[in-house]
Amino acid sequence: MKTIFKYIWVVLFLGYSTSCDQNFDELNTNRVAATAIDEMFQINQAIISAGPTSFGILVYEVGAVQHIISPNSGVLAGANFNQDNRAATQSNWQQYYRNVIKNTKDVLSRIGNNPARSNLTQMTRIIQAYAFMVLTDTYGSIPYREAGVGFSQQVFFPSYDPQEFIYTDIIKELEEASAALSASGRRETADVLFGGDVEKWRKFGYSLMLRAGMRISKANPSLAQQTVAKAFAGGVILTNADNAAVRHDANYLNPAGNTLNATEAANFYLTEPFVNFLKNSNDPRLSAIAVRYVGATSGPTQTVDRQSFDPALQVGMPMGNDNAGAVRAAAEKGLASFYEFSQADRRRINKLTAPSFMVTASQTLLLLAEARHLGWITAGTVEEYYNAGVREHMLQMASYDALMAIAPAAIDAYLAANPLNPATAVKQINEQYWISSFMNGPEAFANFRRSGFPELAPNPFPGREVLFINRLTYPNSEISVNSEKVQAAIAAQGPDNLETKVWWNR
């Protein structure tokens, strides 16, 4: 009897174990996990990561061009003291390589030759070119040809390419991609930048090409002139309706705005050179950008009931002050504390949902004004492009917040009182570009170095390492992991410090 029970037990066990194997793969397959993703969504991630809104721009680029500064040290040390702080100089590197280049290179490796997605291929090439421009303008020599292919090509230690090569190839990429966009091709409606509108993408591409041409105007005038002429003929952004901007919302906050509305709300101030420049010309943009908390003695006392947008009351923080110096500077100006210096209004231009602009009509028109002055284009006049560039930026203010809108009559009055002088045209054009690129730190920093305008005094901080910052330093992580390739780049380019100039900075 015991033997019978043993056989029954074995049969039952085998039957049970066999039944457990039935549909095993099906039962252990996650039916809701994504096994593939539409490449457009990867490019959307690249687009929203491309906006110039990182924490690092607050520490370096906007301070290097003397727009916004902090008197505080520690993690905020950077352009406020003209000192190297590699915890912050790595910001652009991490933002663009990790979130933009990684996605664009992956998409191009998978759909580059698919004619059905040709428009997406060209859009990808354009946004990738934009990211590489920011990276090479920031650091100089960077991984370019071998960047972002660790997965697809197993290149884990990419070589660095010199900036001259990078710019030549970027120009080629932008020219080819912009020309290849087709209205008869598939419209990528999920696109968060332009909703798949190929004409707007084309203008974006040619506007970037114009920017690239003007960037190398001193380093390679011949190629620069050819590039500018081709970009202009292709069609560029001339109105704010075509601006390339990341539009933030409650689900995707502006990173810089988030920082300036949280931990660093009371730590960053408009500089005295910037505020005075706008005040001295009665620029209506000052009341749109600036706020002063009259009588504030601390961060918590920077309350709405103290805020003033009156241009006459705005006071910029002098350059070159640490915390103790800012206290003295405030006392010398009769302020209650340094918390009373003017700020970029975090409830308007730096609010949580403020857009971040990559390329604008104002910037493009001002570059055309300079190109026309050089004789590189023949249509229109320098004055027409200049006036249009100033006007578009003033009109652009309303896109941050309706309360920042500048009346057309105020714009007309400003242009009448501040006409373009042919003898100082290049200076005036690039001073306006400086204003027009406010909060686009990488672009303001690049054009300031390229043009030499505005004529800013060196940061007077006694512990500064350099008079002017010419580039940012490579991340420590890159130096430790990819040391051989980094050292080769440094040997060719110059010391890895804030003073070494990039190729186009002549």
Image: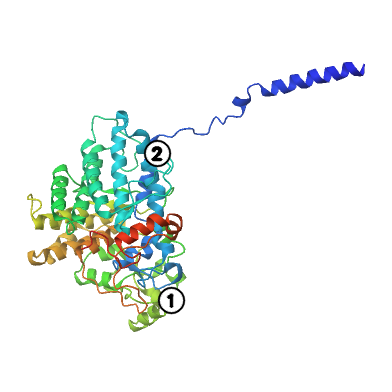
- Number of marks present in the image shown: 2
Residue 372: x %, y % from top left: 10, 55
Q: Quadrant of the C terminus?
A: bottom left
- First in sequence: mark 1 or mark 2? 2
Q: Nearer the viewer, residue 209 or 411?
A: 209
Residue 228: x %, y % from top left: 15, 50
At label 1, counting other C-alpha atoms closer than 10 Å, the crowd grade (few under 14, some 14-19, many 20 or more) is some
Q: Quadrant of the N terminus?
A: top right
Q: Nearer the viewer, residue 164 or 458?
A: 164
Give the farthest residue toward the right. Answer: 1
Q: Is residue 89 left or right of residue 224?
A: right
Can residue 470 be spotted in the picture? yes
Q: Which residue, given by chain and number where applicable, does mark 1 sit on? A: 297
Q: Is residue 428 left or right of residue 74?
A: left
Local secondary structure at mark 1? loop
Residue 211: x %, y % from top left: 21, 52
At label 2, counting other C-alpha atoms closer than 10 Å, the crowd grade (few under 14, some 14-19, many 20 or more) is some
Please tell me which residue is depicted at 24% across the width and 29% down the height of the picture. 184
Q: Which mark is residue 368?
A: none
Amino acid type, label 2? Phe
Amino acid type, label 1? Thr
Q: How is the image coloured?
A: rainbow
- Give the distance between the C-alpha atoms of the residues marked 1 and 2, in whole angstroms: 47 Å
Q: Which residue, given by chain and number where applicable, does mark 2 sit on? A: 41
The image quarter containing residue 206 is top left
Camera-side mark, 1 or 2:
2
Question: In the rendered image of this protein, does residue 56 appear above or below residue 178?
Answer: below
Local secondary structure at mark 2? helix
The image quarter containing residue 77 is bottom left
Q: Nearer the viewer, residue 89 or 383?
A: 89
